[in-house]
């Protein structure tokens, strides 16, 4: 019984460790990520609305990189 439990735990540990073995983008997948519609700022209207929200939260322009407070009532 103890041997079966040890085998099961080692199997679970092996599967858990190999589950994250492939992290990153393969060279043949990079063409899909290089498309313009895959970029973070390809939608100009969405980008403008996001800038307005971040401006309202931060109380200053350029607050996109920080998650701050503010009332957001702008």
Image (cartoon, rainbow, N blue to C red):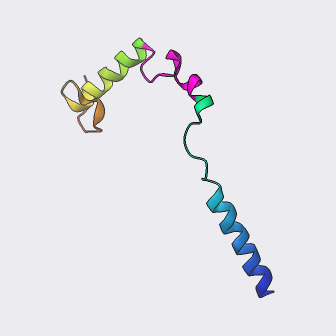
Q: Position of residue 19 (x, y in %)?
A: 65, 54
For the question of whether residue 73 can be seen, the reply is no
Q: Position of residue 49 (x, y in %)?
A: 36, 18
Q: Is residue 38 magenta?
A: yes
Write down the region rendered in magenta.
30-43
Q: Residue at x 70, y 73 (%)?
A: 10
Task: Please state the total of marks drawn on the protein image.
Answer: 0
- Above or below, comparing residue 6 to residue 56 in the picture: below
Where, by quadrant of the figure, is residue 58 drawn? top left
Q: Is residue 53 left or right of residue 46?
A: left
For the question of whether residue 58 can be seen, the reply is yes
Q: Quadrant of the N terminus?
A: bottom right
- Above or below, comparing residue 24 to residue 61 in the picture: below
Residue nearest the observer in this picture, 33 or 64: 33
Q: Residue at x 76, y 76 (%)?
A: 7
Residue nearest the observer in this picture, 30 or 56: 30
Q: Is residue 22 left or right of residue 50?
A: right
Q: Position of residue 43 (x, y in %)?
A: 45, 14
Q: Residue at x 23, y 26 (%)?
A: 62
- Above or below, comparing residue 21 to residue 28 in the picture: below
Q: Is residue 39 magenta?
A: yes
Where, by quadrant of the figure, is residue 59 drawn? top left
């Amino acid at each position: 019984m103890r041997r079966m439990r040890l085998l099961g735990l080692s199997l679970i540990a092996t599967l858990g460790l190999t589950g994250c073995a492939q992290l990153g983008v393969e060279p043949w997948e990079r063409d899909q990520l290089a498309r313009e519609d895959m970029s973070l700022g390809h939608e100009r209207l969405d980008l403008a609305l996001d800038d307005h929200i971040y401006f309202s939260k931060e109380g200053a322009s350029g607050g996109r990189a920080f998650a701050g407070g503010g009332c957001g009532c702008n």
